[in-house]
């Protein structure tokens, strides 16, 4: 899978409410030992990322929320970056940012670094 495709599968997983479907999408897009670095801390493993999505994204008080990619994917070699927006159920943006991901040779994400908010 190429960088854009695997990122889009990951984003689809973030937006999927049904737990079984979300798990399947995360298996397609993330390695089992993925490392997730974000403003709320570091998590290791696909299950830890799924728990984050369930608790923080799906469980957000402004929910149902939606995560979307707002830019193309810039993917030189095994690294990729893209801009994103997190919005509430009313479509109002709650947070924007950029993620940088590392892709394995088979095309799965094994590292995610989340940069939330604007850089001044």
Image (spheres, rainbow, N blue to C red):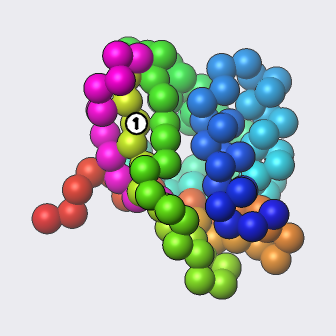
Q: What residue sits 21% from the left and 63% below the top? A: 119
Quadrant for the N terminus, please. bottom right
Rendered residue at 44%/58% (across/down): 71
Image coordinates of residue 35 in percent, x first then y, are 63, 59
User: In the structure shown, which secondary structural element does the residue marked by tag 1 occupy?
Assistant: strand
Toward the bottom, the furthest residue is 77
Q: Quadrant of the C terminus?
A: bottom left
Above or below: residue 118 compared with residue 95: below
Residue, far left: 120
Magenta stretch, residue numbers? 89-99
Quarter-wise, where is residue 7 in the image? bottom right
Task: Tell me if 69 is positioned left or right of 47 in this view.
Answer: left
Residue 115 within the magenta-colored segment of the rendering:
no
Q: Residue at x 45, y 23 (%)?
A: 65
Relative to residue 11, is residue 114 drawn left or right?
Answer: left
Which residue shows up at 23% across the image and 56% down it?
A: 118
Which residue occupies the foreground of this view, 117 or 75? 75
Magenta region, mostly helix, strand or loop?
Answer: strand
Could you tell me if residue 43 is visible in this image? yes
User: Quadrant of the rendered structure where residue 80 is?
Assistant: bottom right
Q: Which residue is denoted by mark 1 in the rendering?
A: 86
Mark 1 Cα-neighbour bin, 10 Å: few <14, some 14–19, many ≥20: many
In the displayed structure, 25 sits above or below 107; it is above
Residue 38 % position (x, y): 44, 52
Q: Nearest the camera: 48 or 79? A: 79
Q: Do we see residue 34 in this rendering? A: no
Tell me residue 96's x, y (percent): 33, 46
């Amino acid at each position: 899978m190429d960088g854009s495709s695997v990122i889009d599968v990951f984003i689809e997983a973030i937006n999927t409410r049904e737990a079984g479907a979300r798990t399947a999408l995360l298996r397609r897009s993330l390695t089992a030992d993925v490392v997730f670095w974000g403003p709320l801390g570091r998590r290791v493993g696909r299950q830890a990322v799924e728990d984050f999505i369930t608790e923080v994204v799906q469980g957000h008080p402004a929910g149902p929320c939606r995560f979307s990619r707002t830019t193309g994917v810039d993917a030189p070699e095994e690294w990729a970056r893209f801009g994103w927006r997190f919005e509430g159920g009313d479509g109002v943006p709650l947070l924007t940012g950029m993620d940088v991901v590392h892709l394995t040779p088979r095309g799965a994400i094994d590292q995610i670094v989340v940069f939330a908010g604007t850089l001044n």
